[in-house]
Amino acid sequence: MKTVDIAVIGAGPAGAAAAIQAARHGASVVVIDKASYGRDKVCGDGLTPRAVGALNELKIDMTDAHHIDGLRMIANSTRRELDWPETSRFPSHGAVWPRRRLDAALIDAAGAAGAELVWETEALPALDGDQVIGVDAAGERWEASLVVVAAGAPGQVARMLGANKIVGEPYGLAIRSYVESPRHDDRHLEACLTMRDGNGNSVPGYGWMFPAGDGTVNIGVGALNTMKGFKQLNLNNLIDLYYEQVREEWDLGPYLEKPRAWRLPMSTQRRYGPGWVAIGDAAGLINPMNGEGIDYGLESGMLAADLFVEDPATAAERYDLLIGERFDSFLRTGRRFSFLIGHPWILNSGLRLAVGTQSIANITLKVMGNLIDAETPGTAGKVLTLADNVLAIADPILRRTRASGGGSA
């Protein structure tokens, strides 16, 4: 048996951030992951200014990442290319950093800070009644004062802790590949907000081109389960349709690897309990309006570590409270919005509005950049608060008339 202050299940950005922050403050930390070092996580690879801000706070060297100035939004024939705004909280640039390199930079920093790293090993919570007292991994127990669950989309760990997704809440699916393009060093992300499947049905989601600056572009599409016919939606066909749509403009080569899909959990029944907290995707911290969660993962990991260092006895409960204050209102708005745009006529009308004027496009930019939360002042924050109040009234109707009838991730 071994004893540590914190045991982290999962070596992705959220888990690594928690390990870095805790280890740098003197806590003993072990990080355990089922994959091998250098694993590649399927992802869009885009980093918002919020994510870059968190990486800067963690003192991660980002010279290997491709600098991004802003976002190009496309809705039918309308195009708006906007730079990320200057704010007092976040830098005015984002990045594209393929996950193999991002994750390696983060976990290397965790190891350099003193965290012990265990690869190719499955870790599960060790329970004493409802109290998590550590983790069991490869026949060995690590006792820990706090277990940090950073295992991504819900699986066995979540089932053991009662932290599965909330039945009836929206979730997303996405798929991506890489292609060569002479525009690999473009300084703007591109998002096509008007997506249609092979039958011409509107898809609540978007297609993206994220230039990586290394000769390749990350191409992908994502969709929410609130659309009619979601269960029959073929993601491989959808990315192929999008590829043909942008092939000539981006002068694309063939896929460099077979397109790979992943789930986007957007809710959880619990994100803490006696002796444990869930962070990042495991806590459902994904923006339903863009499918992005790396920044929330980094922030939640750092917060969990900071609170543990301050007071281990109250860390889990305080974590849940502060995460709720920071994100719950905005993410609830996003989930309600997901049901709204599951209706094609609302989706199409809304997209025309989203990029129709400069002022509204600026708000859309902040939503797509995860630059809005409970601490956001100004017009964007007020608009989202108003939207949440309106959607709260409409929510029961939207759920009763939801397009897809549900399904499970």
Image (cartoon, rainbow, N blue to C red):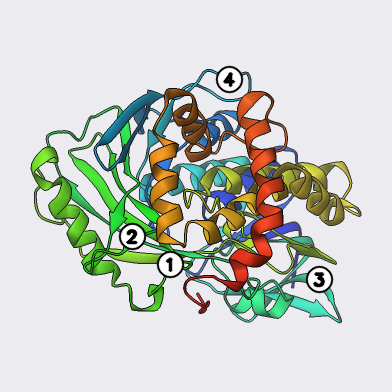
Judge from the rendering whether residue 253 lies leftward or rightward of residue 190; answer left or right.
left
Badge 3 amino acid = Ile
Place residue 352 in its image quadrant: top left
Whole-percent x, y for residue 390 in the image: 68, 48
Place residue 143 in its image quadrant: bottom right
Disc 1 secondary structure class: loop
Badge 1 amino acid = Met
Place residue 260 in its image quadrant: bottom left
Which residue is rendered at x = 32% and y = 49% of the image? 194
Q: Earlier in the sequence, mark 1 or mark 2?
A: 2
Give the residue number, with chain letter if any, for mark 2.
202
Q: Are marks 3 and 2 in contact (CB under 8 Å)?
A: no
The CA distance from mark 3 to mark 2 is 48 Å
Badge 2 amino acid = Ser
The CA distance from mark 1 to mark 2 is 8 Å
Give the residue number, with chain letter if any, for mark 1.
227
Q: Earlier in the sequence, mark 4 or mark 1?
A: 4
The CA distance from mark 4 to mark 1 is 35 Å
Q: Earlier in the sequence, mark 3 or mark 4?
A: 4
The CA distance from mark 1 to mark 3 is 42 Å
The CA distance from mark 3 to mark 4 is 41 Å
Give the residue number, with chain letter if any, for mark 3.
133
